Amino acid sequence: MSKKTLSDLQELAAALRAPTGCPWDRKQTIASMLKYIDEEVSEVREAIENGDHDNLREELGDVLFQLVMIAQMAKEKGYFGMEDVVGDIHHKIVSRHTWVFGDDKAETAEEALELWKRNKEIEKSNK
């Protein structure tokens, strides 16, 4: 099987939602996806709790595709696209990890968590 990318998943979601795509997928809405993403996240939790790494891999894929589908629906509505989601989370992770990508120092997990909380508060207060 050839390597696939996030872009490949986005194209797959767009094809499923296209007029000639799958009637079930076209019928879904962002709100209707709630129960499916909840189910998939529960299956991820179960795989983690059971230490079932083979199943975890599959279930993470299921969650990822649910997210891609929801982002596709949001794009169709003109709300945002997956590129926006990826850009936003990339920025958030970098800006909150100032001990990795900035000048702060964290030697322990506890120090890192405290800095994360501080950086999150600073970010929220600047909005």
Image (cartoon, helix red, strand yellow):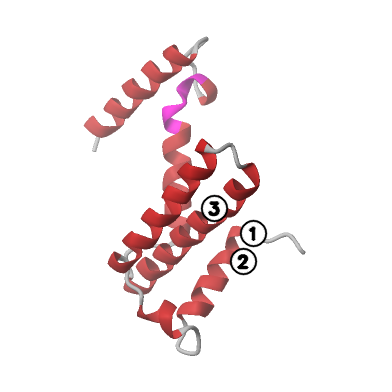
> Is the C-beta separation of discs 1 and 2 under 8 Å?
yes
Front residue of this view, candidates 98 and 73 = 73
Q: Earlier in the sequence, mark 2 or mark 3?
A: 2
Front residue of this view, candidates 67 and 81 = 67
Front residue of this view, candidates 116 and 2 = 2
Quadrant of the image occupied by residue 72: bottom left
Report the quarter where the C terminus lies. Answer: top left
Query: Is residue 85 located in the magenta-colored stretch of the structure?
Result: no
Location of mark 1 (residue): 5
Task: Describe the element under mark 1 as helix, strand or loop.
Answer: loop
- Residue 122 percent across, percent down from the top left: 28, 26
Q: Amino acid at mark 2?
A: Asp
Residues in magenta, as a range:
95-99
Whether residue 77 sits left or right of residue 110 in the image: it is: left
Q: Residue furthest right?
A: 1
Task: Describe the element under mark 3 as helix, strand or loop.
Answer: helix
Mark 1 to mark 3 CA distance (whole Å): 17 Å
Task: Describe the element under mark 2 as helix, strand or loop.
Answer: helix
